[in-house]
Image (cartoon, helix red, strand yellow):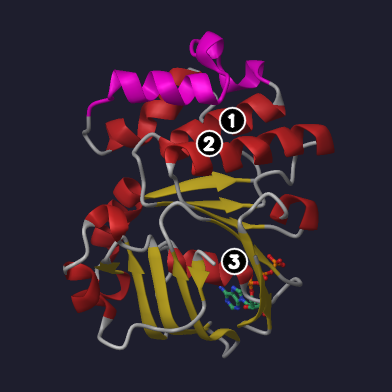
């Protein structure tokens, strides 16, 4: 299995990863993560998980089981009440909000059900936006490869509103990957697509993982979508209660 639920690192994970070359570090490590939301809801209850680089993990579970909270904690959007989260070897809970925003911009990609493309920007400018926001230059060869992969080389000057839903989600995939992030979090990425288009997008996601060694964590209610992942973990009541490879 590429995703380890156990064993947890015996030494503190930060010191463990310091000696590991960046390309061999796990993309994400959660150690005994608990998140109690205001009002006392224990949305995560002692979750431990290692997401290895180059793996495609699906997270399933009934509504309210903690999937979104898991994703938010693992992506540095939220911080655990206890336990630790490392993204690309960086301990998220030690960062202030500004540093977490930089971590997300530089090391994490996001894909949403509703694409979240900016309607006034061209497809090219949408895809390269995360780099430009971080003051980074675009690697033309990488951009060419990405847009070729997602099949949008001929639509770079279009506006998102001129694209189909599947094309918009493929643009969002390219945008998520343009920074070469340690991990991409996809939240119901095919929830707004018809089943044929959804399968195409999922196959593309799997190809990006397998061919380009990207790492994807996808939250989904759809067992068909999860079937494209290397592995699936199932959550219930804030815990991981099963894993299927
Ligand atoms: N900001 C919040 N404040 C208080 N409680 C919250 C908050 N966010 C989530 N919760 C609660 O935490 C629990 C887990 O919610 P979460 O959204 O992580 O589940 P989920 O599996 O993603 O659900 P869904 O599939 O419906 O999106 C639920 O009981 C939810 O009501």
The disc at residue 74 is: none
Q: Residue at x 28, y 24 (%)?
A: 139
Looking at the image, residue 128 lies above or below residue 156: below
What is the spatial separation of the Cα atoms under label 1 and label 3, in whole angstroms? Answer: 22 Å
| Quarter residue 73 falls in | bottom left
The residue where tag 1 is placed is 170
Q: Residue at x 26, y 66 (%)?
A: 90
**Mark 2 and 3 residues: CB-CB less than 8 Å, in contact?**
no
Crowd class of label 3 (few under 14; some 14 to 19; many from 20; radius 10 Å): some
Residue 201 percent location from the top left of the image: 67, 36
The reply, left or right, for residue 103 in relation to residue 80 is: left
Residue 182 percent location from the top left of the image: 36, 52
**Mark 2 and 1 residues: CB-CB less than 8 Å, in contact?**
yes
Pick the quarter of the image with the N terminus. Answer: bottom right
Q: Residue furthest front?
A: 1
Q: Residue at x 73, y 54 (%)?
A: 227
Looking at the image, residue 5 lies above or below residue 205: below
Q: Is mark 2 within 8 Å of ligand 1?
A: no
Looking at the image, residue 245 lies above or below residue 33: above
The residue where tag 2 is placed is 173
| Quarter residue 65 falls in | bottom right
Q: Is mark 3 within 8 Å of ligand 1?
A: yes
Residue range of the region highlighted in magenta in the rendering:
137-163
Under tag 1, what secondary structure?
helix
Where does ligand 1 appear, by image quarter?
Answer: bottom right
What is the spatial separation of the Cα atoms under label 2 and label 3, in whole angstroms? Answer: 19 Å
Under tag 2, what secondary structure?
helix
């Amino acid at each position: 299995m590429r995703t380890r639920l156990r064993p947890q690192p015996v030494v503190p994970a930060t010191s463990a990863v310091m000696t590991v070359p960046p390309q061999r570090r796990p993309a994400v490590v959660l150690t005994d993560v608990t998140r109690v939301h205001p009002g006392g809801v224990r949305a995560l209850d002692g979750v431990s998980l290692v997401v290895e680089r180059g793996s495609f993990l699906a997270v399933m579970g009934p509504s309210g089981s903690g999937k979104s909270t898991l994703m938010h904690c693992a992506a540095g959007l939220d911080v655990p009440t206890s336990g630790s989260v490392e993204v690309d070897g960086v301990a998220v809970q030690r960062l202030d909000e500004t540093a977490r925003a930089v971590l997300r911009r530089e090391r994490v990609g996001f894909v949403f059900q509703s694409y979240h493309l900016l309607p006034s920007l061209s497809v090219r400018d949408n895809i390269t936006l995360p780099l430009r926001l971080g003051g980074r230059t675009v690697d033309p060869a990488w951009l060419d490869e990405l847009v070729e992969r997602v099949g949008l080389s001929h639509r770079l000057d279009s506006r998102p509103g001129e694209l189909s839903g599947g094309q918009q989600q493929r643009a969002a995939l390219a945008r998520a990957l343009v920074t070469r992030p340690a991990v991409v979090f996809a939240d119901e990425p095919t929830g707004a697509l018809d089943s044929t288009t959804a399968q195409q997008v999922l196959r593309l996601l799997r190809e990006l993982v397998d061919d380009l060694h990207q790492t994807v964590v996808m939250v989904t209610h759809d067992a068909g979508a999860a079937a494209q992942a290397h592995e699936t973990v199932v959550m219930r009541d804030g815990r991981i209660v099963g894993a299927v490879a």
